[in-house]
Amino acid sequence: MQSDGTVPNIVDRTVQQALLQVMEPIFEPTFHPSSHGFRPRRGAHTAIAEATGYLKDGYQTVVDLDLAKFFDRVHHQRLLARIAERVKDPRIVALVRLMLKAAVIMPDGTKIAVQEGTPQGGPLSPLLSNIVLHELDGELARRGLRFVRYADDCNIFVRSERAGKRVMTSIRGFLETRMRLQVNEEKSGVRPPDEVQFLGFSFRCTRGEEGDQVAVFPSGKAERRLRRTMREMTPPNWGRSITSCMEGISRYLTGWISHFRLCTPEAVQGLCVLDAHIRRRVRAIIVRQKKRPRFLYRHLKAKGVSLRAAASCAYCGKGAWVKSNRPAMTKAYPPSWFDGRMASLKAMWNGLHQAQVSTQLVLEF
């Protein structure tokens, strides 16, 4: 296995894909409905839909479980035993064993023997992880717990903090003694919904006339990551046209809102704030591209800005970031100027929610 770490090469990927096509039809029907990671017709959106349903039903204390270095700590014999229970062809089991035991060849030629863990980055890795964690799903279901699992990230929903602590203690013991896996103590805990960040989403529960209501937002971490990406896509030394910059931003935002389209109307105000921040970054690029205050002054006059406002912006003595939010720049480049030129998170969210809801969001329990 040629690797930078444990990422398989193209030959390994081809063999893993062949194994996946044989093994997935055998194991997929046996997986629990609350397992959503790397499965056909399931994903992050179905996981969030199920979690929202549990919160609406009053299970508003979350046992947030995260496994520490899960892919590096999978016990080979336990995994192979689970595979052998359903795969009757010993050649398949032997091939999986060879892949698990294959030494990792580092870029400098050093070979590292593998004693535990599964190869990451290949087509077969997600299926192997679901086979391992199917035992956890079965234990949670046996206890009658409501849970949502996506790969090694699992949330269990209970009615009280006391019940949550009890479940956390017992499940930690089960994972460590029975499955030989470790819980990431820093990321795990018993939390209220508004402190949980699950697959990039956060929740806020309120009680109204029609019962418990759940608002879904992008998590704080997801928003910070978006802002960081926008900084990288709008650098101070941007040397190409502003049109190419906005096209790149639009492509990224389209993918971002596709993931976060499950956000509820309560999140729209936050999307507007993000839109305003992105527009300001584009205005800052325009300011920098004018290079000199007198060039910016002439440009603003040509855009219909009054002489006084143009001079106040161009000659204010501040940097491009401050100038980008001066009245002259917001008048020359108002939000309407960006319509049709750059994607808007709010506009795309509205468009997605006017269209027919994706069938992926409909679950039957």
Image: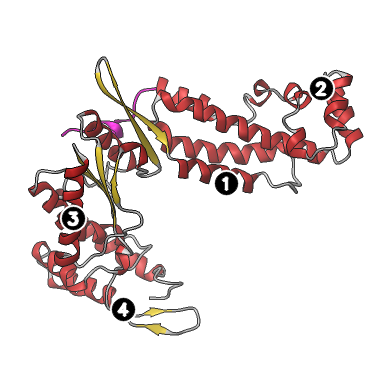
Q: In the rendered image, is residue 178 in sight?
A: yes
Q: Which mark is residue 229?
A: 1
SS for callout 2: loop
Q: Report the side of 347 relative to 209 (left or right).
A: right
Cα–Cα gap, marks 4 and 2: 65 Å
Q: Residue at x 21, y 35 (%)?
A: 59
SS for callout 3: helix
Cα–Cα gap, marks 2 and 1: 30 Å
The quarter of the picture where residue 216 lies is top left
Q: How many residues crowd around disc 4 within 10 Å: few (fewer than 14), some, or many (20 or more)?
A: some
* Position of 216 relative to 37 (above/below): above
SS for callout 1: helix
Q: Work out whether mark 4 precedes mark 3 in sequence or the reverse, and give the earlier one.
A: 4
The quarter of the picture where residue 57 lies is top left
Q: Work out whether mark 3 precedes mark 1 in sequence or the reverse, and give the earlier one.
A: 3
Q: Residue at x 33, y 64 (%)?
A: 69
Cα–Cα gap, marks 2 and 3: 65 Å
CB contact under 8 Å: marks 2 and 3 = no
Prevailing secondary structure of the magenta residues: loop
The quarter of the picture where residue 334 lies is top right
The residue singled out by tag 2 in the image is 303
The residue type indicated by label 2 comes to Lys
The image shows residue 39 at horizontal and vertical percentages of 26, 48
The image shows residue 92 at horizontal and vertical percentages of 18, 69
Q: Which mark is residue 169?
A: 3
Instruction: Look at the image and give the residue range highlighted in magenta.
Output: 355-365
